[in-house]
Each structure stands twice: as structure tokens, then as C-alpha cells.
Image: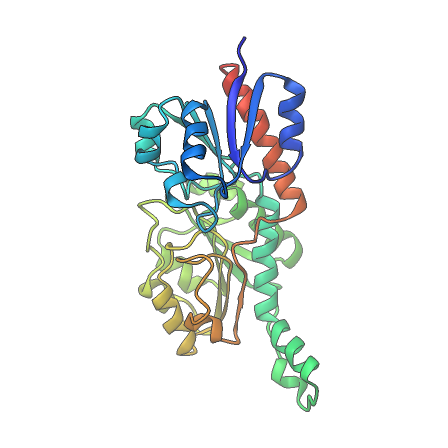
Amino acid sequence: MNAMNIVYFDYVMDPIFLEILEADGGFAIDRRTLADPEADNFEALSRTHVYQISSAKDELPKPFWGAAPLFERCPNILLLSTYGAGYDVCDLEAATAAGVAVVNQAGGNKEGVAEHALAMMLTVAKKIIDADRATRRGGITDRAAFKGIELNDKTVGIIGIGHVGTRLAKMCRGIFNCRVLAYDPYLTAAEIAARGAEKVESLQALAAGSDFVSLNCPLTPETRGMVDASVFRAMKSGAIYVATARGYIHDEAALTEALASGHLAGAGLDVWDIEPPPVDHPILAMDNVVVSPHTAGVTFESRRNIAKITAEQLIAVRDGK
């Protein structure tokens, strides 16, 4: 049997990806670099069967995104494999029209992302960043200025109770005795209960009933912009909002207003409409917001798990499973 060709750019998530495929022996792996001439890279892609694509929008130039122009130039591509849980650089409709299968590794980084969401909740609630900065500056005279709130016995609202949301619900219930609400219109009350939460029928109801709100759903046409000003207005005064899913699901301008007005006590943001966010983004000037550059799932364990799942998926697809 002829080897299946794979092209990827610059790096893999973890060496185990290459170790598994090389041990299998059924793949011809071509590492390219984005520093190479674009024409040479497209020549390689035009011959390949599998395109192992970076999932980072800010790292991959648009000509190499999994979209109609690429599929037209590279008709031999049969499979597009994107790292992680989303399809940020893939046009699924265009892939379907071109007969290209698309896979990701949803759930492969759930531990890292859930831990990050929880860490952001605690960091904002306990004012840890403020206290750290003040301690380094010296001259603290009033420790009460850093008085925070506890997560214990609070109500946590989870938007999207999939892999990450389910893991976060378990952490909040098991460690902090939280009541957990979930908004997920694709699941029944019984299914949500099995994942450790109580179903609510609207985002506004979840917002009104929660001390902490965590965004954990995928970006889809249905979820784009759904966490809008009405949702932030419905949140309790003094509540905390955390987002580790994708940008464009919440309205950044509405969130900025909710924070600037003092309605929300703070926020933890790992995802942005534009990544990385511009340094003059108004949210970055707020001391009650903890931020990171879409690194919630960037752990040694999560990257190794995703790389392992990816290699196993490619073998399964090749074998017709």
C-alpha cells in the first residue's frame, strides 16, 4: 500500500505525533516552514492527502487556511486535521463541497482549559494580581483593600456544558460545593444533570442566577455574538465573567461597558475577537481583569494528549474506520 502523504508547517503539538506515525510506517511526512516561498509550499500541499493545519489564526497566513481557495489549488487533499477543539481556520462548508473530511480533537485539552477557567475565577475573586503588584511596589497600609470573595458555596453558571464545561462543573461542585447552572439548548435537563448541573432555559436566566459565569461553548453561527449587552445587564451586580472558549461569542464592547460601569466585579479573558488583542484595547487597562493570550489549553499534558489523538485519528481515517 502506498504511503499517505501528510504536510504540516513548522511544528507539531508534541513529538508523540511523529513517533506514532513513524512507528506505523504508512505515512510520508513533509514538514514545511512558512518561511519557505509560498509557491513551494503550495506545490507540496497540491500533492498531499492530509493537511495537518495549525489552529492558531494569528500564526497561519490566510492563504493557507482550510478554505475554498486552498481546496481549489490543492485537489488531492482528502483530510484536514486541525489541532484542538475548534475549526477557527477551516471553512466547513467549503471543505464539504470539496469532498474534504475535517477532524479535530474536541476534549483533548479539557483538563487544561477547565483548570484555566477555574484559576481565572479565583484570581479575579481573590484580587491576587492586584495584591501581587502592590506587594512588589511596597508601602501597603491597608490589606482590606484586597478583600476578595470566596468561590465556596457560590452559584456558577456555565454556558455550554461540553467537555470543558462538564469538567469545570465537577471541579466547582466537588472542591467548592458550588451550585452549577448550565445553558445548553442542545441537551435535555436529564443530560445536563448527568454532567453535574441544572438546566436553565435562557442565557438571561443563567446570568441572573449566577455569581460566576463561564463561557465554554464553541463558536458557531448560532453562538456568534450571543453573549450581548442584555446578558451582561442580567448578571448580578458584583458578578465575575470568565471566557476561555472563543472570541466573537461575547460582545467585547458590551463587556467593556459592564466592567467600566462597575456592574461586574471583574473578568478573566483568555479569548479575544482579535488575537492577540491590540495593546490599546480598553479592557487591558482595567485592573479588575485577568488576561491571557488564548493559552488555556497550552499545557504539556494537553498538547501531548491532542498530538496523540491526532495521530490515532489519521491512522483510523487511513484504515477506513
Whole-percent x, y for residue 267 in the image: 49, 67
Specify the quadrant that holds the N terminus: top right
- Front-most of residues 174 and 46: 46
Q: How many marks?
A: 0
Above or below for 241 versus 319: below
Q: Is residue 298 left or right of residue 266?
A: right
Whole-percent x, y for residue 209 in the image: 44, 62
Q: Residue farthest to the top?
A: 1
Identified at 39% across, 21% down, the residue is: 76
Identified at 64% across, 48% down, the residue is: 299
- Front-most of residues 119 and 33: 33
Q: Is residue 265 left or right of residue 138?
A: left
Identified at 59% across, 57% down, the residue is: 118
- Front-most of residues 202 and 138: 138
Whole-percent x, y for residue 147 in the image: 62, 79
Identified at 62% across, 73% down, the residue is: 129
Above or below for 112 versus 108: below
Question: On the image, which quarter does residue 93 sit in?
Answer: top left
Above or below for 171 versus 98: below
Above or below for 259 versus 201: below
Whole-percent x, y for residue 78 in the image: 41, 22
Q: Is residue 15 left or right of residue 68?
A: right
- Front-most of residues 145 and 38: 38
